[in-house]
Image (cartoon, rainbow, N blue to C red):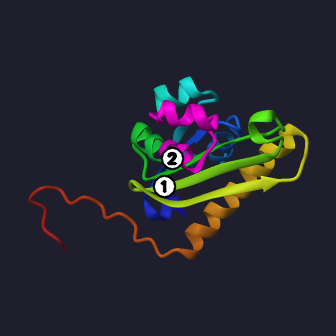
């Protein structure tokens, strides 16, 4: 679908540790739409590479709708992509998460957040939890692309070129 739209995507991950990047890079003709991604696992790296607000992020352990939105927007700028997907959360129960498993993800398009949602899971092996987050995000992105009527960006006309 992204190839048909002549659009690109980049990914910023934390909790999924590169699983989304792996999925996109293994898609057919990924070279034509996948710009790349970054796994920023801690606050320092998220602030340095994805320009999240470090003071706010420290208070929420980098897991919030605000943080994931900043990640999705900034990964687009860093990789010059139309779309950005970001995810941050917990793959194993820890005190910081209230011993719960959840993740926030956001999808941005041309500088706007299109989707921002929380995924809650009951329990599971950390790898299976990461895989569940990844699969759910990919499914929701696919559904969004299929259901939304987003007008593809227009090809830029060369200066002085005539329309035919």
Q: Which mark is residue 108?
A: 1
In which image quadrant can residue 87 be found? top right
Q: Which residue is mark 2?
A: 72
Horizontal and vertical percent position of residue 13: 62, 39
Horizontal and vertical percent position of residue 114: 50, 62
What range is drawn magenta here?
Answer: 50-71
Q: Is residue 128 left or right of residue 74?
A: right
* Quadrant (top left/top right/bottom left/bottom right) for the C terminus: bottom left
SS state under label 2: helix
- Graded by Cα atoms within 10 Å as few (under 14), some (14 to 19) or many (20 or more), the crowding at tag 1 reads many
Residue in the image at 71% along x and 40% along y = 16
Asked whether disc 2 touches disc 1, contact meaning CB atoms under 8 Å apart, the reply is yes
Residue in the image at 20% along x and 60% along y = 157
Q: Main secondary structure of the magenta part?
A: helix
Q: Inspect the magenta stretch and tell me whether residue 65 lies in it.
A: yes
Q: Nearer the viewer, residue 79 or 92?
A: 92
């Amino acid at each position: 679908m992204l190839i048909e739209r002549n659009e690109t995507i980049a990914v910023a991950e934390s909790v999924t540790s590169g699983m989304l990047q792996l999925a996109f890079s293994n898609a057919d003709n990924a070279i034509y739409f996948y710009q790349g991604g970054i796994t920023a696992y801690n606050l320092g790296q998220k602030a340095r590479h994805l320009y999240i607000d470090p003071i706010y992020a420290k208070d929420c352990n980098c897991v919030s709708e605000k943080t994931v939105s900043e990640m999705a927007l900034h990964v687009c700028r860093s990789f010059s992509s139309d779309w950005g997907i970001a995810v941050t959360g917990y793959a194993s129960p820890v005190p910081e998460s209230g011993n719960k498993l959840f993740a926030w993800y956001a999808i941005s398009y041309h500088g706007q957040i299109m989707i921002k949602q929380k995924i809650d899971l009951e329990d599971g092996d950390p790898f299976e939890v990461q895989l569940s987050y990844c699969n759910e995000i990919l499914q929701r992105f696919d559904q969004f692309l299929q259901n939304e009527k987003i007008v593809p960006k227009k090809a830029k006309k060369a200066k002085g070129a005539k329309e035919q």
